[in-house]
Image: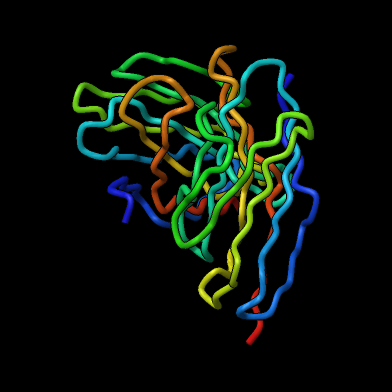
Amino acid sequence: DSGVTQTPKHLITATGQRVTLRCSPRSGDLSVYWYQQSLDQGLQFLIQYYNGEERAKGNILERFSAQQFPDLHSELNLSSLELGDSALYFCASSVGGPQQETQYFGPGTRLLVL
Amino acid sequence: AQSVTQLDSHVSVSEGTPVLLRCNYSSSYSPSLFWYVQHPNKGLQLLLKYTSAATLVKGINGFEAEFKKSETSFHLTKPSAHMSDAAEYFCVVSEWEAGTALIFGKGTTLSVSS
């Protein structure tokens, strides 16, 4: 158990809908990262937040957004969902900002868009 | 630009025999390199990381990796495979000096037979 929690574990929704994925980092970690894992694209970094501020951006679509709250939990919002958004979404956390630090991954949220 | 190539998509070994998972990287800076493991339906777990200290890095569960700058390689090895090692393994590069995110390889599936 990494100490990173993600909810929900599974999510089934329809195209065009909007969903919110939630992540709670390990106690004391200030950075939260979001990743998407799909069969065709593999594991891709989406976005990083550090202590409430956006720190780095990866291959995140404009339909997707994220935020980190004062209690350091983070939410990833996916809107206007398409079939291709079906994937496993991971959250990870680390103590500080630099990306060479060890990241601890949550169990993931599996999203299925029908 | 940084990139990482895992040379084998699937490796099969017998229990008790050595494991070699190959990874080559491309980086313009001094990279940080990681190996992560993902067991079925689980999140990712850090096996080991290289951040410009010793070139031979020891990780958890008997795994180790050697950073070879001249060959731009970071191969993962284990002297004796165990059934519980069966999983997906990801080689990851980070150019923190460039402020870029973690870049994941496509993954290598390790199968271990008895």
Image x and y of residue A70, in percent: 21, 21
Image x and y of residue B79, in percent: 60, 66
Image x and y of residue A31, in percent: 35, 26
Q: How many marks?
A: 0
- Which sits in the foreground, B14 or A37? B14
Q: At 48% from the left edge and 27% from the top edge, which residue is drawn?
A: A100
- Which sits in the foreground, B65 or B38? B65
Q: Quadrant of residue B31?
A: top right
Left or right of residue A14, residue B29 in this image: right
Above/below status of B33 relative to B96:
below
Q: At 66% from the left edge and 82% from the top edge, which residue is drawn?
A: B113
User: Which quadrant holds the N terminus of chain A?
Assistant: bottom left
- Which sits in the foreground, A45 or B90? B90
- Which sits in the foreground, A86 or A14? A86
Q: How are the residues colored?
A: rainbow
Left or right of residue A29, residue A100 in this image: right
